[in-house]
Image (spheres, rainbow, N blue to C red):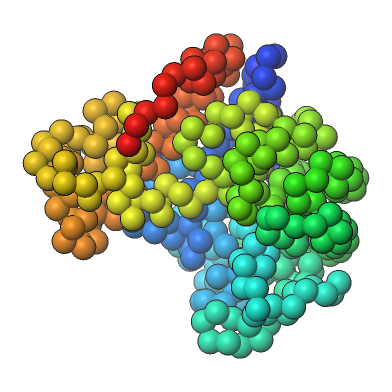
């Protein structure tokens, strides 16, 4: 019996966009879905109450690497798992930490066994193996777990991409062999398709991973410096190679205007730090383009950030007040800005889902593509 299951409710015949439901141990997740990133068991700047009551986020993402280092997965296990530890009753997906480890550059060494790395916190040495990352994620007790993979930067030579892809496949097999020896796993395990920007390597990786008969599949190794159109090309080539009846997760994307493009290529799940990170840096996403709140033109602007947005921030505060908070370095700004940006992303996904369910997605997508790009 599968730990999670996926149900497709509607599809767009022209684009391949899907609307469905991911059934998890901690509730149903309507797809396509954008997952707010809660790297260290918290979505920076907002409370769990806001995530549920204001944003209605059905699933969030946490990171194995960071939680392994601090406070430690065994402590979280002792305290009842990640859901209880952070008082989050809904679904959680945990990244294996592979991307974070590989971003350490000089602080890590990759072998077929796994990755040896030094903590960015205190310099202590650690080893991540395909099996150990599964054990850490089981201790966290997330609903969806990711296998350890090797993510390489862009650009990369064909040979480097091939070696990383083949290692990713070997690690995925080892992860699943270990995972399937567990009697009652708390979450599903998804492997990650790698292969750089080479379609044939991606296709070969997908073929090997499909043989694992996983509950879902991810496409990784994007947003690593490549041009945005190339990201979409890779997803367009890979998504049809993955099982139609399993959720497809593209990791680490994207900008608001890119979300419908990934959905049009058959993607069901996405995550990205952009809405929260940009919020803290004073960049707000709106229906009329980006608002960089520090600009002087907002000093006496009594209007909301986005008149078309119904979030708490837009219902309650003016651009002038938000600019004041940002200029003064007040913590409240990060909270209000993050609430708005996440609401913008999640509402965008709800609009996309609504159009797929109504059978109007292809027409809506064309109208979005043909609309003038809003200026900042």
Q: Quadrant of residue 142?
A: bottom right
- Quick one: quadrant of the N terminus? top right
Residue 229: give x, y in percent of width and height: 63, 36
Q: Quadrant of residue 266?
A: top right
Residue 240: give x, y in percent of width and height: 79, 31
Horizontal side of residue 174 vs 21, given as left or right = right
Of 282 and 45, nearer the camera is 282
Relative to 75, residue 247 above or below: above
Relative to 259, residue 172 above or below: below
Residue 371: give x, y in percent of width and height: 44, 19
Relative to 348, residue 42 above or below: below
Can residue 48 be seen here?
no
Horizontal side of residue 286 vs 85, given as left or right = left
Q: Quadrant of residue 67?
A: bottom right
Residue drawn at x 15%, y 33% is: 303
- Quick one: quadrant of the C terminus? top left
Residue 45: give x, y in percent of width and height: 34, 57
Horizontal side of residue 349 vs 151, given as left or right = left
Residue drawn at x 49%, y 40% is: 255
- Numbered circles on residues, count: 0
Of 201 and 355, nearer the camera is 201
Residue drawn at x 29%, y 45% is: 292
Can residue 221 be seen here?
yes
Relative to 224, residue 255 above or below: above
Of 187 and 208, nearer the camera is 208
């Amino acid at each position: 019996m599968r730990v999670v299951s996926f149900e497709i409710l509607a599809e767009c015949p022209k684009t391949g966009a899907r609307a469905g439901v991911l059934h998890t141990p901690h509730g149903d997740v309507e797809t396509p879905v954008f997952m707010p990133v809660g790297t260290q068991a918290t979505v920076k700047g907002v409370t769990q109450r806001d995530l549920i009551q204001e944003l209605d986020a059905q699933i969030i993402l946490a990171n194995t690497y960071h939680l392994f280092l601090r406070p430690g997965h065994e402590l979280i296990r002792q305290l009842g798992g990640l859901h209880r530890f952070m008082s989050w009753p809904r679904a959680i997906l945990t990244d294996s930490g592979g991307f974070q480890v590989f971003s350490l550059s000089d602080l890590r060494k990759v072998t077929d066994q796994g990755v040896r790395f030094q903590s960015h916190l205190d310099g202590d040495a650690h080893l991540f193996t395909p099996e150990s990352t599964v054990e850490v994620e089981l201790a966290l007790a997330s609903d969806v777990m990711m296998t350890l993979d090797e993510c390489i930067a862009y650009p990369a030579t064909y040979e480097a991409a091939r070696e990383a892809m083949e290692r990713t496949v070997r690690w995925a097999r080892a992860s699943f062999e270990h995972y399937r020896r567990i009697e009652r796993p708390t979450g599903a395990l998804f492997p990650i398709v790698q292969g750089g920007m080479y379609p044939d390597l991606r296709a070969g990786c997908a073929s090997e991973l499909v043989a694992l008969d996983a509950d879902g599949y991810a496409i990784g190794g994007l947003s690593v410096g490549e041009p945005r159109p190339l990201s979409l090309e890779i997803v367009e080539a890979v998504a049809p190679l993955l099982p139609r009846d399993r959720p497809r997760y593209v990791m680490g994307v994207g900008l608001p205007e890119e979300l419908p493009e990934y959905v049009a290529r058959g993607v069901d799940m996405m995550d990205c730090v952009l809405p929260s990170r940009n919020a803290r840096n004073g960049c707000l996403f709106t229906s009329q383009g980006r608002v960089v709140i520090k600009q002087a033109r907002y000093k006496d602007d009594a209007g909301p950030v986005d008149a078309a947005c119904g979030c708490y921030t837009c219902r309650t505060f003016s651009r002038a007040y938000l600019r004041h908070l940002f200029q003064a370095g007040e913590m409240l700004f990060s909270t209000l800005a993050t609430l708005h940006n996440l609401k913008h992303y999640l509402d965008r996904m709800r609009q996309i889902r609504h159009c797929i369910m109504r059978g109007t997605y292809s027409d809506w997508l064309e109208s979005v593509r043909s609309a003038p790009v809003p200026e900042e």
